[in-house]
Image (tube, rainbow, N blue to C red):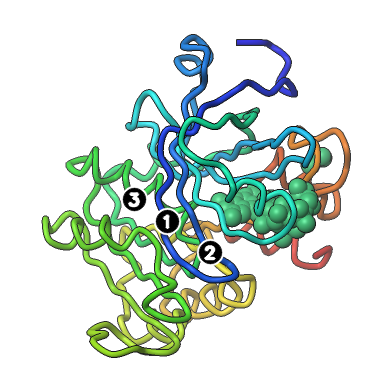
Amino acid sequence: MSNNPYIPFEAEVKKVHQETEGARAIKTFTMQFKDKNVQKEFKQQPGQCAMIGIPGVGESMISICSSPTQKGSLQFSIMKMGKVTSAMHELEEGDTAMIRGPYGKAFPIDAWKGKKILCIGGGIGLAPLRPIINYVRDNRDDYAGLDIIYGARTPADLVFVDELKELQKKKTAKVHLTVDVESEGWKGNVGFVPQYLLDLKPAPKDTIAITCGPPIMIKFVLENLVKLKFKDDQIFTTLENRMKCGIGKCGKCNVGEVYVCKDGPVFSCAQYKLLLPDM
Ligand SMILES: Cc1cc2nc3c(=O)[nH]c(=O)nc-3n(C[C@H](O)[C@H](O)[C@H](O)COP(=O)(O)OP(=O)(O)OC[C@H]3O[C@@H](n4cnc5c(N)ncnc54)[C@H](O)[C@@H]3O)c2cc1C
Ligand code: FES
């Protein structure tokens, strides 16, 4: 693999899974570098991202949503939003895209050993949390517990549903699902994620809370975690500022003096609060 972190490598689409339908559909892509050495040497940690490029269209930063415990391929869950992500949605099995990375700081998941892990996600925001969930699943004895609070607009907008059901069935995790608007047959909660968090009242003792979702959800989840007596060093989040280079060179992603691509995208609540005046 090249020492130049800016060089992309060819990767083949091995599998495409349609997570949700509609104008803002979400698909999960399983990708494998064509060069076996590149695949072997690409070592990401939960929370890191990669730039995915479609030649002639552009590139976008996407969270790597597979855990490092999954060897031999990478996964990305992508919502169809603009030009680049729409082109990604056209990709089929056997097609090629360019990938460079991994970029950014990861969640300090090894430092959390022995703790209870509480993941709080909204919509496509579960994608950056999925590597944590699957890492804890694959190293379950190292962690005291795994709770997932996850919400979307409707039941049809929830992602990774089969995996979440499996985690619940095998008692690997306690999964708490909520939707803003229910549909026939829905058995989970109805309401917004921040309120559901308050209703569930997770105990802060020996617990690490990680949240990702729309900015408004993150704002209220952080406020409610404080109400539940979580301390700043027990709370982590990940930011999605606009990015271009991904390696701290272009200045597109900065908040004050912090480059989200290089110094983040993962931040503790204490670090996040320092960014707020410049956001
Ligand atoms: C750290 C990080 C992780 C991300 N993880 C995911 C993920 O797992 N799944 C997913 O679907 N999306 C993710 N995104 C958003 C994604 O990168 C897209 O840029 C965004 O969805 C806009 O779609 P587009 O690139 O098709 O838009 P276009 O209009 O084609 O945008 C072109 C370029 O503008 C910038 N841009 C435009 N809108 C945004 C935006 N809202 N956020 C960031 N950059 C933007 C990007 O540099 C992009 O390459 C992530 C963004 C960041 C910064
Ligand atoms: S994306 Fe270029 S400095 Fe962060």
Crowding around mark 1 (Cα neighbors within 10 Å: few <14, some 14 to 19, many 20+) is: some
Image position of 228 (left or right of 248): left
Tag 2 and tag 1, C-beta contact below 8 Å: yes
Give the percent coordinates (x, y) of residue 238. 59, 55
Give the percent coordinates (x, y) of residue 242. 77, 53
Report if the beta carbon of the residue with label 1 is closer than 8 angstroms to ligand 1: no
Q: Disc 2 designates what residue?
A: 25
Q: Which mark is residue 186?
A: none
Where's the N terminus, which quadrant? top right
Residue beneath the point at 38% across and 70% down: 150
Q: For numbered disc 1, what is the local secondary structure? A: strand
Q: Which mark is residue 18?
A: 1
Q: For numbered disc 3, what is the local secondary structure? A: helix
Crowding around mark 3 (Cα neighbors within 10 Å: few <14, some 14 to 19, many 20+) is: many
Between discs 3 and 2, the one toward the N terminus = 2
Between discs 2 and 1, the one toward the N terminus = 1
Report if the beta carbon of the residue with label 3 is closer than 8 angstroms to ligand 1: no
Where's the C terminus, which quadrant? bottom right
Image position of 59 (left or right of 48): right
The span from disc 3 to disc 2 (Cα, nearest Å) is 23 Å
Q: Nearer the viewer, mark 3 or mark 1?
A: 1
Give the percent coordinates (x, y) of residue 79. 57, 59
Q: Is residue 79 above or below residue 59?
A: below
Between discs 3 and 1, the one toward the N terminus = 1
